[in-house]
Amino acid sequence: MVFPIWEAEASLTFYGEVLGLPLIDAFGGDDWGGMPWLMMIFAVGDGRELVLVARRGAAPPSDDTTPADIRHYAFSVGSADKQDAWRAKLATAGVNLWEEDHGRQHSLYFADPNGVILEITTPASSPGSTPRPEALAFARGWIRETAALTL
């Protein structure tokens, strides 16, 4: 599952330290809805992940102006071949989709009939593996940079 967040540091502490979920990856980019972003991926167990997305300068919406694709459900498949099969199946069904390369992962995005955004990504992050040490450093660096910009 993917959730938008507005308090990156508090969320990192809550999910990582309070709930004890391992931070298995973190990365970011320059523009998601016009703002730099941070994505933190936590292992939930049984191969499942909880993903939190912060956008620098974003506040909780008074009216919902959050980009629709920040709030989405992600499913991982085991290989590029399986993702290709999904791409073909969606195309056959006339489903409009878009693709994004996230460095280590490649994702297909599409909306259900209600506008709920879904993602099929490969390869899956490896929740059973040792968390990447640089994930915590990346997340903390992004948070420090954001704090410095708001002084």
Image: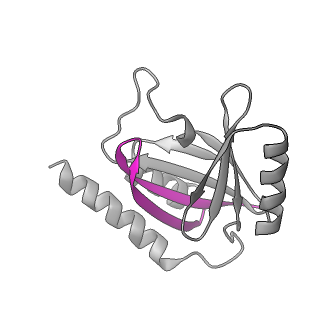
Name which residue lies at 69% across and 39% down. 96
Name which residue lies at 67% across and 52% down. 108
Residue 64 drawn in magenta:
no
Quarter where residue 44 is shown: bottom right
Residue 44 drawn in magenta:
yes
Q: From the viewer's perspective, is 33 left or right of 93? A: left
Q: From the viewer's perspective, is 117 left or right of 61? A: right
Q: Which residues are magenta?
A: 20-45
- Does residue 79 appear in this view? no
Decide which of 136, 4 is in the foreground and name it. 4
Q: Where does residue 140 sit, x and y in percent of width and height? A: 36, 65
Quarter where residue 102 is shown: bottom right
Q: Where does residue 107 sit, x and y in percent of width and height? A: 65, 57
In the displayed structure, would residue 50 be above or below residue 118? below
Residue furthest out toward the top:
63
- Does residue 126 appear in this view? yes
Name which residue lies at 38% across and 50% down. 31
Decide which of 80, 41 is in the foreground and name it. 80
